[in-house]
Image (cartoon, rainbow, N blue to C red):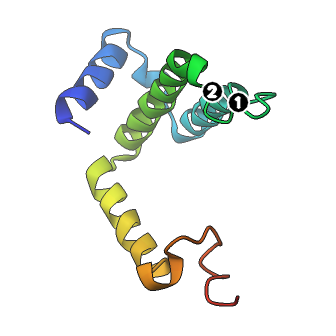
Amino acid sequence: MKQETIDKVLKFRDERNWKQFHNPKDLAISISLEASELLEIFQWSGEDIWCEEKKEKIREELADVLNYCILMADTCGLDLDEIILEKVKKNDEKYPVEKAYGHKEKYTELGKM
């Protein structure tokens, strides 16, 4: 994510003096609530698992989730690029291509088939 984007989210928060309300607990709750709103788009979608006609709503809810993630990282003093790259490295170790390619199983189940 571009630093410019992160800075705009933080500026929006700071201009409204909302940082005082942002603690890890409340931000985690907000992330979960917004993720639930994203999930709600797909509720009762039947065969239409892609929900093409709802793409604008998906964009809005995904942006809300990401905004709260930016705020959480800032509040906790975490660098988004660093934590994402660390997680990709861990997942790469848990899900080596030769075992995980084309499989959806959790890493603890890979190779047991």
Hey, what amino acid is under mark 1?
Answer: Phe
- Residue tagged 2: 51
102 lies left or right of 51: left
Which is more toward the observer, 113 or 92? 113
Residue found at x 48% / y 77%: 95
- The N terminus lies in which quarter of the figure? top left
Hey, what amino acid is under mark 2?
Answer: Cys
Which is more toward the observer, 98 or 75? 98
- The label shown at residue 68 is none
* Disc 2 to disc 1, C-alpha distance: 7 Å
Circle 2 — which element?
Answer: loop
Q: Mark 2 vs mark 1: give the one in front.
A: 2
Residue found at x 56% / y 17%: 57
Quadrant of res 3: top left
- Picture coordinates of residue 29, whole percent (x, y): 64, 35
Whether the residues at callouts 2 and 1 have beta carbons within 8 Å, the answer is yes
Quadrant of res 85: bottom left
Q: Is residue 6 above or below residue 109?
A: above
- Toward the bottom, the furthest residue is 112
Residue found at x 50% / y 29%: 62
Residue found at x 25% / y 21%: 8
- Picture coordinates of residue 45, whole percent (x, y): 76, 28
83 lies left or right of 111: left
- Picture coordinates of residue 54, whole percent (x, y): 59, 18
- Residue tagged 1: 42
- The C terminus lies in which quarter of the figure? bottom right
Q: Is residue 100 visible?
A: yes
Which is more toward the observer, 88 or 26? 88
Q: Is residue 101 above or below residue 66?
A: below
Circle 1 — which element?
Answer: loop
- Picture coordinates of residue 110, whole percent (x, y): 62, 83
